[in-house]
Each structure stands twice: as C-alpha cells, then as structure tokens.
Amino acid sequence: MDTASEQERPKWDNKVQYLLTCIGFAVGLGNVWRFPYLCQIYGGGAFLIPYLIALVFEGLPLLYLELAIGQSLRKGSIGVWHSISPLLGGVGVASMIISLLVGLFYNTILAWVLWYFFHSFQEPLPWSQCPISENRTGYVQECLASTPVNYFWYRQTLNITPDIEQSGSLQWRLVVCLASAWSIVYICFIRGIETIGKAVYVTATFPYLVLTIFLVRALTLPGATDGLRYLFTPDWALLMDPQVWLDAATQIFFSLSLAFGGLIAFSSYNPKKNDCERDTLVVGIINSATSLYASIPIFAILGFKATSNFNSCIDSNILDLTNAFDVTEGNITMENYESWLTYLNSTDPDKVSSLNLKHCELQSFLDQSASGTGLAFIVFTEAVIEMPGSQVWAVLFFVMLFSLGLSSMFGNLEGVLTPLLDLHLVPSWMPKELFTGLICVFNFLVALIFTLGSGNYWLEIFNSYVGSIPLLVIAFCEIIGVVFFYGMKRFSDDIESMTGRRPNLFWRVCWMGISPIMLLVVLVAYIVVQVQKHPTYPAWNPEYEKFPESEVKPYSDWVFAICVLLSTAPVVSIPIVAVYRLIRRQTRPQTGSSLPNPYDNQAFSTESFKAL
C-alpha cells in the first residue's frame, strides 16, 4: 500500500476500543442461547472436551491468521486476498456476501428484541395471560390451547402462517421495529470506527453487567442448583457420538465470527506494530469464557422454571386427589404427595386411574431443551413471569440481548463496507455517511421478507444455510491462501515485524496441517449429514390435530432449492474469480515475459519448510 493511502486509513483511538470491538463482534447471541443448549443436550460438562479441542486447534489459529493478515496488509477482506493473489479475489467477495446476508436476518432478531423490550414495561407482562376473545365471552381459544407465552410469540408478535408457502402480509409493528433497529445501527456506524469505537464501550461491556446481575439473582431462586447440576453433570458416553464433535467444531468456529471479513477489517485499522498474537488469545479466551459464564445464570433460571412447572404439576394432581377422595384440604402436601398417592393407589386403584393424573418428574421438565429464539422468546420469558419484579428482569434481559446483537452487527456491516471502500467502488462525490445510509436502507428493504407472516420460517432457513457451509469453505480457502500463495516464511516474517517474534511451532503446525485438515473433515462431515436427510421445519398450526405441538413439515422442492442456493451462491465467487483470472493470464499478451511474476512467492519452497 502506498504511503498516501496508508495515511488516509482510519485508526483506532486506543487499543481498548479495538479489543472491545473484536470481542463485541465475536461475543453474540449464540453465546447466550446456543452454547448452553449444546451443553445441555450433549452431556453437560463432557461437551467442554470437544469444544476446547476445537478452540485450541481450529478457532484460535484461524482467529490469529485473520487478525495478522488484516493488520499486515491493512485492507478489507477483498483487498487482502486480491493482494495475496488475484486468484483469491473471490474469497473476499464471498466473505462480503456472507456478511450482507447474515446482517439481513441478524438485525431482524434485534427488531424482535425491541418489540419485546417495548412490551416489558407493561403490568402485567402481556405474555403472562391470555387475551380476551373478540366477542368478550372468554379467552382466545388458540391461547388457551397452548400457553400465553407461545401465543404472544407466534400470534401477537409474528402473526405466523401455518406454512412457509403462505406468505401472509407485512406485520407493520415488526416493520417499525425493523426500521428502528437499522436506524440505531446506522447512528452507531455513521462515521465508521470513529463512532463504533465510542459505542462499543457500552454495547460490549453492558451484557457482562447484566449477566452478573442475573447470576446473583438466579442463584437465589428455588431450583437453581437443579439446573446447574443438570448442566454440568457429564455424560461421557455421548462423547462417542460423532455429532457431538461436529457441533463442537462448528460452534467454536461460528462463535468467533471467523470468515465474515469483519475481523480482517477491524485489524486493518491497527498500527503496524501491534501484538496480534496477544489480541488473539484475549479475544478467543474471553469469547469462550463468556459462553461458560452465560450458561450459569441461564440454566439456574431454567432450573427455577423446571421446578416451578414441577410444583404446578404436583399441585394440580393434589387438587384432583383432594376433590376425588374427599380428603380434607391441606392434608396432601408437596412433601407427602408420593406417600398419599401410593396409599390411594393401593386402596382404590381404579378411581386413581380414572383421574388421569399428570406424570410429574423434575428430570422431564429439565429435559425440555430449547435454543435460539425458542430460548429467548419462549422459555426465558415464561421463567421471567414467575420471578418477583418480572418487568425489571424482562427489561434487563432484552437490553442485554440487544447490546449483544448490536455489537455483532458492527462487524457484519464493517465486513460489507470496508471492502467496497477499499476497492473505491463508492463515487468520490458521495460522502461515506450517505453511502452507509444507502446500504442500511437497502438491507432494511430486503429484510422486509422476514416481517411477513412466513418471515420466521425464512429467517430459520437463512440462519441454517447461510451461516454454515459457506463459512467453512471460506475459512479453508483463507488458510490455503496464506500457506500456499502467500507463503509461511513471508507470513512469519510479517508477524515478526509486527510483534517482534516469529510465530511458534504450535501456530505453524496448526496453519500448515491440523487446522485445514480439521476444517476439511468438519466440512465433509457436515455435508454428509445434511444430504442424508430431507430438511424439515416446525410449523405453528392451530388446526394441527396435536396442537400445540409443532407440525413438522418437509420443505417443498422450490424452497429446498433456495436452501441449496443459499449454501452455495455465496462461495460461487471463489471459483468464478479464480477461473476468470486464469483465463486472463492465459490470454494476456506475453510481453515482458522475462519479468518475474509478482504473485509467485514460492510458498512451499525449501525455505518454507525450514520455517517449521
């Protein structure tokens, strides 16, 4: 890069801003609602073993590579990979497309969070009871058949259709919330890293304050110890399931926000002399520690919810037994329920059987796992109702979710804007603030699809297919690009000039062997798992005979085609650009052929292997 352009490039005010921005980008909603869920279904503490192995040998090496290459070449994702080799220009384009697509649905989740936040000030909370029917003679039947929490989410928030092929109409309340979410992102992003650097002081730190408040409160709730015991009790047998290792590898990968291009862009604003190895360890360790830290209050609260449901179940059975056997009220209690049930079963088993008593077992309530929107907007909101001062806890929870999502949106938007600005695709007469605004307006208009009645179904498709295979492919190409095209010796020299020391043997072995092999294995295993089953989705259908259970439906052929398109289209640019460059190289007039090839850096020369 020339000196003039280097001087024009923005810089962070200080190191704290940079680290907070990277941590805010990496630590997102998945740390709160995905990691605890995986721990729960995959043997509690036993899941930490594959998770930590994936962190050490896959996550941290890739994180180090992105921070180092961005800081060294001081460009966005497209500029970095094009400068390494024109054949790799498609890698940066793929990262930019992924950031754009993920930002579309990620900010929609923030719109849902705003909707719940606005309703959290009501007394009582609107999802705590069923609304009155239109004829004012009772409660809405759909709500009575399910729960007030489910009804508020599926009907009053999403107004969801019973099938993905029924689009429904735009939900204007969600359109307003979506516009508000994009406006907030724009205000925080209007001057690039100048305003982001100020915003992250709040957005990256506030969630830790709220998590600590929740931790203190949650540990005092009845049933909290049951939730924590359930979370951390290891089930070692589950480690023999390959799916556990696959999910651990993908979780750490997506949790660190690798391959989006945002981390490369953020590190490009660093001074040349900066210890990017230490930054890698700080960001990686804090990200994983946050996942563990968030799991404690989340599962303490889920333990409280399971205990409350268990007690309600027992109370319902006690009431039925008291009325059926004419037992004096208060004689059957929670403590002696089992002995009374055994006694009544022995004296009049037919009468007890006719009551159809509920099967009450604490373990079954703890087994009711949920992740993603199900955890945030259904399970947690139901638990908040039972907590004293429920409005305060609801407000805190949704402000925390919004802060987590907002800081991650900074990285997604940066992954789109920086490459475009670096490639000078923005007209010189257009202010950067106006261009940023146009990008936000474009994203808002496209994201309107998620405010339709079928919007939640489409959001799940984007979440499942955009953020999976494409990211693995991009990350694999990044490692290949650095090792084969840029060269390990040259990369090690760059790191030495930036940090004062060469990368140690561990990093070099990971980059040249362990990490790409792990990525390739995970990618192939993921594809094999996906092709063995036709994808389905849970639909909310009040006409379903087993309602309120979700009706599991297969995707129709045209929807499945879109799923495949979302998995492949973002990375199609990688082979297209490579083939185009090769054709250009072959058809270019061979003048001055004696000149050395500036991209032939002999990555695997003898000196490269000496670097090991």
Image (tube, rainbow, N blue to C red):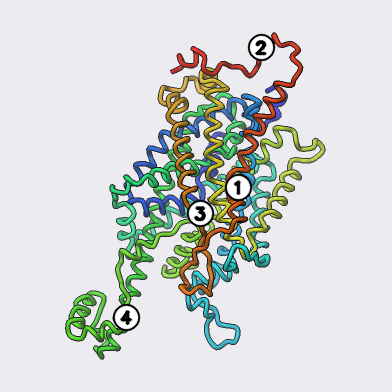
Q: Where is mark 2, residue-wise?
A: 596
Q: Where is mark 3, residue-wise?
A: 534
Instruction: Out of 533 and 174, give the one closest to the viewer.
Output: 533
For the residue marked with disc 4, what is the amino acid?
Asn
Helix, strand or loop at mark 4 = loop
Crowd tier of the residue under label 2, counting other residues whose Cα lies within 10 Å: few below 14, some 14–19, many 20 or above? few
| Contact flag, marks 1 and 2 (Cβ < 8 Å) | no
Q: Where is mark 1, residue-wise?
A: 566
| Contact flag, marks 2 and 3 (Cβ < 8 Å) | no
Q: Residue at (74%, 40%) from the top-left corner? A: 432
Q: Is residue 362 above or below residue 325?
A: above
Q: Earlier in the sequence, mark 3 or mark 1?
A: 3
Helix, strand or loop at mark 1 = helix
Crowd tier of the residue under label 3, counting other residues whose Cα lies within 10 Å: few below 14, some 14–19, many 20 or above? few
- The percent coordinates of residue 153 (x first, y second) are 54, 67
For the residue marked with disc 3, what is the amino acid?
His
Q: Where is mark 4, residue-wise?
A: 356
Furthest residue in direction right, as rendered: 429
**Real-space CA distance between mark 1 and mark 2, rounded to the nearest whole angstrom:** 40 Å
In which quadrant of the rendered image does the N terminus lie? top right
- The percent coordinates of residue 547 (x first, y second) are 48, 73
Whether residue 295 is visible: yes
Q: Residue at (30%, 71%) from the top-left corner? A: 360
Left or right, 342 with reference to 96: left
